[in-house]
Structure formats: C-alpha cells, structure tokens
Image (tube, helix red, strand yellow):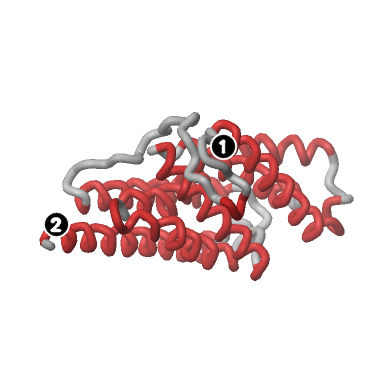
Amino acid sequence: MNNMNKRFKVASLSVAIAISGTVSLLLLTTLIGQQSGQKILPYFIYQLISLVISATVIAAIYFTKGHRLNYLKLGSLRAKVSPTKLLGIKEGESWLHVGITFTVIISVVTGVFLFLGYRGQLTDVGINSWMLALLAALPLSAINSFNEEIITRWAIVEGLTDKFARYAPWISAVVFGTVHYFGVPGGMVGSVMAGFLAWLLARSIQDTKGIGWAWFIHFCQDILIFTVTIALFI
C-alpha cells in the first residue's frame, strides 16, 4: 500500500508539474506575443525562455522520481507498437512503419488545415519569403517541438508508470488539446487534432521508451506551422 501511495504521489506531482509548465508557456506567449506580431525576434526569444522552462520541468521530475529518469532519450525507434484496433494498428507492427505512416498522414492533415485557414493570404507570398520562412522555421521547430514534448508529454509519461501508465496518453491529450484551442491550428478542430496527436505521441514514448518519434512527428508539424505563419509577414 505504501508503494502504491508513493506512485500515486509521483503521478500527481508529475501531472501538476506538466500543467504548471504548460501554464508558463501560455503566460510566456501572452507576454512575448509569439505568432501574433510581425517580427521574427519574438519567436526566438520565446523558444530560448521555453528551454529554461523545459530544463526546470526536467529537474522537477528528476527529483520527484527520486533521481532517476527512464524516458529522457530517443528510445528504440523500431520498437513494437501497442495494438490499437481503432487506428488499424495490429499486433507486432513496428514504430518505424507506424511512425512514418502517421508522420505523413498528420502532416497532410495539418497542411490542408493551414491552407484552408490562410489560403486568402498565401497567394501573395513569394518564393523568397517561403525560403526565408523555412530557414527560420527549422531551428524554431526543433526547439519548440522539444519543449512541448518535454513539458506536455514526457513529464506526464515519465511520472505515470505501472497501473497509472494507461492514463498518461489521455491526460496529455487533454492538456495539449486544451492549450492548442488558442494556438495554430486553433479552435475546436485544432484542439481535437492536437489532442489526438498528444495521445498518439504519448503512446510512442511508452512503447519506444524515449521521445524520438514524438519529437520527430511534432517537429514535422511545427515546420509547416512556423513556415506558413512566418511567411505571411516576411
């Protein structure tokens, strides 16, 4: 019983840490105004400060778990996937196949959503603006996807183990989906999309014992989002 109480305490604190980190990102967005202005500098300032928040979250989880971390690594990218009938994922499939498949599918969905949302403005964007936006988007996407995976996904999966592990993907989905109601893509559709992505990526961390696939899939979506939003004002 004492052991179970200890695990429950770690799980509860981990969720609290993840939510606190997420709220910090929201406050930072409000203060700095990333994706709401017409300058590139706020994007980079936001990411650099977010790295500090990520480091704080990692440290907090480290001490909460008694100086040990299990998932803060790339993990096994060819690990077996937990079967999910609803998504057509069968027993014995590899994350190499599933990861590539969902990277393509989710990227196409994100791209279509962005096109429909900004199609009236994108016609005026020249090739030079697209190239500059892509160059800026690459480092921003790498850092942003890492920060958000650490704060809204890894912290929850790392803290919820054993009997509590099954709740981690759903908690991450709620946290990530709620935040993205105010993000890009936004609104209810964006929130549902982000919630599904969070659930899937949390499962990937559990299966592969690392953040490799979660970081990469998230990175691909951020490239699309940052490239489009930056291209609109360059």
What separation in Å lies between label 1 and label 2 (alpha carbons)?
Answer: 42 Å
For image coordinates 62% across by 47% down, the residue present is: 88
Which residue sits furthest bottom? Answer: 188
Give, as a three-letter code, the residue at label 1. Answer: Pro
Which mark, by number, is residue 139?
Answer: 1
Classify mark 1: residues with Cα within 10 Å, few (<14), some (14-19) or many (20+).
Answer: some
**Which residue is pictured at 21% across the width and 50% down the height?**
65
Amino acid type at mark 2: Asn
Residue 191 x/y as whole percent: 60, 65
Q: Residue at x 69, y 38 (%)?
A: 134
Q: Is residue 204 above or below residue 191?
A: above
Crowding at mark 2 (Cα within 10 Å: few <14, some 14-19, many 20+): few
Q: Please tell me the numbered disc located at residue 66.
A: none
Q: Secondary structure at mark 2?
A: helix
* Dot 1 or dot 2, earlier in sequence: 2
| Residue corresponding to mark 2 | 3
**Vertical placement of residue 96 versus 39, above or below:** above
User: In which quadrant is the N terminus drawn?
Assistant: bottom left
Query: Which residue does the image show at 65% across and 47% down from the upper left?
Result: 226
**Residue 5 coordinates in the image, percent (x, y):** 17, 63
Q: Is residue 14 left or right of residue 149?
A: left
Left or right of residue 31, residue 104 in this image: right
Residue 114: x and y, percent? 75, 54
Along the line of sight, the residue nearer the viewer: 188 or 134: 188
Side of 50 where 42 appears, left or right: right
x and y, in percent, of residue 104 in the image = 69, 40
Q: Does dot 1 land on a helix, a strand or a loop? A: helix
- Looking at the image, residue 185 lies above or below residue 200: below
